[in-house]
């Protein structure tokens, strides 16, 4: 009898604790076991019912994750982070990537929280060196593949090889849910995600795969929410190209705010920025996407700083007209420093509302030989510290949206398909990490940590680099955070970077821990840009580089249908009903489109064409220029409406 009782206890008790108790815990709507600052690596729940894996809605280190495609893996997070995924509550923002990062449902405090981020480069915006295999398939064929424009043409022509849909396979597989979980497990807390404008739509003549990636961007937002990562969403490609780089969609010309189609391309860009803002400002997404990089790496030297400032001011008025003013009202607006140096942005548009400054310090593209010892680059990286620090007060929130371990420009296609390297040494070593000895890895790790320490708020470029199909290995290993973690040249805990510069005797690493002015983080005074500033930067600007008076240039007319971004399909009750992809129901302006009956120059190739005669179109109505500059914010909402 005693033996039987012991047997019953031995069977029942474990069943109670493993099945019943855990299921109670995981099906309840209660908060997960981990809360801010709990540290440790306990396991808040685990499913022991293989037939019903979704009974597990949250878990920490060691928990079994069921991914959105039904596969499973074990979550590894030594930093007290936990994931949260309740199908009955799909917009729950409880997840936390680690103990020192506020959960998504809690405001990020720029004066003390630090961005430790990675980019998801080469995923939704294709770059030759990140996915060389996509290009290798088409080099030396009839179409010279150098950028996404030409790659799309080559793929579309190759119907037997999968056609343009090959890009969808890439969206579906290049970055997986497990990657996102690993990013959280690596002690990181933000991701910067480059996206193309053709996530929304494309116009006639553009070869891109339009709209398809949006579904995968939405899936990513879901993963970021699940693992507690914040997203800095970066509009990386702009109609006409904003920098002529291959990662702007088309390499070569800059037709955004430059040349005959410069104004028209800017109008179209305003719409894309508006449509993205409307989506990410919805309460279901505001915590997941608290920062919006409106244009990646715009080239000031071509376009002009005053002109681009006019554009940024117009965007600021448009975005804040949609979101309202002050912390909690829409994303930070991140602008790139245009290769001018952050110091030149001191005092930029005082009393704007939450504009952040983005800088991409690289040694690889400086044209230097790259042949000095790696340690000398660590010292140089520490030299970024004082500027970053000063900018926090002189400008406001400042972060490095990109940096890498590339102290030279070695790497397959790193300088573009078919371009040569400036590195004077032997590149083969830097294209094959399997040859690196421990001291090389140690030097690289110190370089990475010196960069992190100096930059303070940073996004490594990039999380993952794909293999070359000819060598079946990563040919630009200096650019892969994931590979560095796996092989010991990236820190497993990014907090370890603090103090690296001081340790090197290189100074420059004292973190900013002071106060921002209240307006710089959306507090008192935000959104009241002085009339003197708005007058100095009118929209449209007084002249467009290479083309003169914007009033003489071809423009579009705001009479088109807006391409809104569709929300995900959610089956959960209540929360699902409210979401339609458009935050501000009062924003009913139509989208820019061509004036019927007018013929426009090629918007991607209009630098050498003559300004066409004014065309009034079949509608006998000349394309209208956008409204004059808005002089005060309360007016902004009304002024951007074109009802
Ligand atoms: C979670 O459950 C699985 C399957 O029963 C088990 O193998 C694993 O050890 C459990 N993990 C933890 C941390 O309890
Ligand atoms: C936010 O999430 C934490 C868990 O990270 C939870 O404890 C807390 O209740 C949540 N707060 C709100 C307001 O939902
Ligand atoms: C392509 O992009 C790489 C990486 O940004 C850059 O180094 C190279 O100059 C670019 N090439 C062209 C032709 O845009
Ligand atoms: C990339 O190459 C490595 C070997 O260098 C190999 O282990 C890995 O499986 C490859 N990845 C893919 C996706 O082919
Ligand atoms: C950074 O700013 C802090 C004040 O927030 C200051 O104490 C520190 O010396 C600065 N460091 C550098 C390198 O400028």
Image: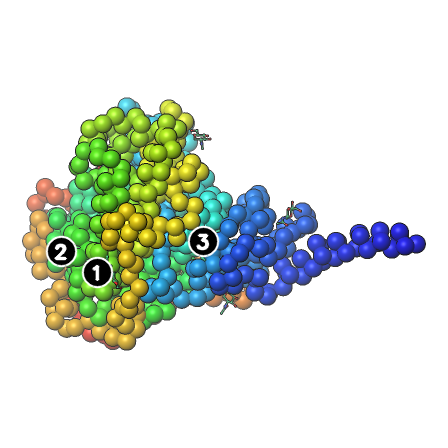
Residue at image location 35% in from the left, 41% down from the top = 445
Q: Position of residue 415 (x, y in %)?
A: 24, 34
Residue at which label 2 appears: 305
Q: Is residue 215 above or below residue 326?
A: above
Verify CB contact (< 8 Å) between mark 2 and mark 3. Answer: no
Residue 422 visible within the image:
yes
Going from the N terminus, do you reach mark 3 or mark 1 first? Answer: 3
> Residue shown at 34%/53% (left/top)?
498
Q: CA distance from mark 1 to mark 2?
A: 21 Å
**Which residue is label 1 attached to?**
390
Q: Nearer the viewer, residue 58 or 113?
A: 113
From the top left corner, tell me how far across and down residue 436 is, in percent. 36, 30
Mark 1 Cα within 10 Å, few/some/many (few <14, many 20+)?
some
Tell me if the residue at label 1 has its CB under 8 Å from ligand 5.
yes
Badge 1 marks a residue whose secondary structure is: helix
Q: Quadrant of ligand 5?
A: bottom left
Q: To which residue does mark 3 refer?
A: 224
Vertical placement of residue 286 versus 484, above or below: below
Dot 3 beta carbon under 8 Å from ligand 2: no
Give x and y (percent) for residue 30.
59, 66
Please state which of the two labelled residues, at mark 3 or mark 1, is closer to the viewer: 1
């Amino acid at each position: 009898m005693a033996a039987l009782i012991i047997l019953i206890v031995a069977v029942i008790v474990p069943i109670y604790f493993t099945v019943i108790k855990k299921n109670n815990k995981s099906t309840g709507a209660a908060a997960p076991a981990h809360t801010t600052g709990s540290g440790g690596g306990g396991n808040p729940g685990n499913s022991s019912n293989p037939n019903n894996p979704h009974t597990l809605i949250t878990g920490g280190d060691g928990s079994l994750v069921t991914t959105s495609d039904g596969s499973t893996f074990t979550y590894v997070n030594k930093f007290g982070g936990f994931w949260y995924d309740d199908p009955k509550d799909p917009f729950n923002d409880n997840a936390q990537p680690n103990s020192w990062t506020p959960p998504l449902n809690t405001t990020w405090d720029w004066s003390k929280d630090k961005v430790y981020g990675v980019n998801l480069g080469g995923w939704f915006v294709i770059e030759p060196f990140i996915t060389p295999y996509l290009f290798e398939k088409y080099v030396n064929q009839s179409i010279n593949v150098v950028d996404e424009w030409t790659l799309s043409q080559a793929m579309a022509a190759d119907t037997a090889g999968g056609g343009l849909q090959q890009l969808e396979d890439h969206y579906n597989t290049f970055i997986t849910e497990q990657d996102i979980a690993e990013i959280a497990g690596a002690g990181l807390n933000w991701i910067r995600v480059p996206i193309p404008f053709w996530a929304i739509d494309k116009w006639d003549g553009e070869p891109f795969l339009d709209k398809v990636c949006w579904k995968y961007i939405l899936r990513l937002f879901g993963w970021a929410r699940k693992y507690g990562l914040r997203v800095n969403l970066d509009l990386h490609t702009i109609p006409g190209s904003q920098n002529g780089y291959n990662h702007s969609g088309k390499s070569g010309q800059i037709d955004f705010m430059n040349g005959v189609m410069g104004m028209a391309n800017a109008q179209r860009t305003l719409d894309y920025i508006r449509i993205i803002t409307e989506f990410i400002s919805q309460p279901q997404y505001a915590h997941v996407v608290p920062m919006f990089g409106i244009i990646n790496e715009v080239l000031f030297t071509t376009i002009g700083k005053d002109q681009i400032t006019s554009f940024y001011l117009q965007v600021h008025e448009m975005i804040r007209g949609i979101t309202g003013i002050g912390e909690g009202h829409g994303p930070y607006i991140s602008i790139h420093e245009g290769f001018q140096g952050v110091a030149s942005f001191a005092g930029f548009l005082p009393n704007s509302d939450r504009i952040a400054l983005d800088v991409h310090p690289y040694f690889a593209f400086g044209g230097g030989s790259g042949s000095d010892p790696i340690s000398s680059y660590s010292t140089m990286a520490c030299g970024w510290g004082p500027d970053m620090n000063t900018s926090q007060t002189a400008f406001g929130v400042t972060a490095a949206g990109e940096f890498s371990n590339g102290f030279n420009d070695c790497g397959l296609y790193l300088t573009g398909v078919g371009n040569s390297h400036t590195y004077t040494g032997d590149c083969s070593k830097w294209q094959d990490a399997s040859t690196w000895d421990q001291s090389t890895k140690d030097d690289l790790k110190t370089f990475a940590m010196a960069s992190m320490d100096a930059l303070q708020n940073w996004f490594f470029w990039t999380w993952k680099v794909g293999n070359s199909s000819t060598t079946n290995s990563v040919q630009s290993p200096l650019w892969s955070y994931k590979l560095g973690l796996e092989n010991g040249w990236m820190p497993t805990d990014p907090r370890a970077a603090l103090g690296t510069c001081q340790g090197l005797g290189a100074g420059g690493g004292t973190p900013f821990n002071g106060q921002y002015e209240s307006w710089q983080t959306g507090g008192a005074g935000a959104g009241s840009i002085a009339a003197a500033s708005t007058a100095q930067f009118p929209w449209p600007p007084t002249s467009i580089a290479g083309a003169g008076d914007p009033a003489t240039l071809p423009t579009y007319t705001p009479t088109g249908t807006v391409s809104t971004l569709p929300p995900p399909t959610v089956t959960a009750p209540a929360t699902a009903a409210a979401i339609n992809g458009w935050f501000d129901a009062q924003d009913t302006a139509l989208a820019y489109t061509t004036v019927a009956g007018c013929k426009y120059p090629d918007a991607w190739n209009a630098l050498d064409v003559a300004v066409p005669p004014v065309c009034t179109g079949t509608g006998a109505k000349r394309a209208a220029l956008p409204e004059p500059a808005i002089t005060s914010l309360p007016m902004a909402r009304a002024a951007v409406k074109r009802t």
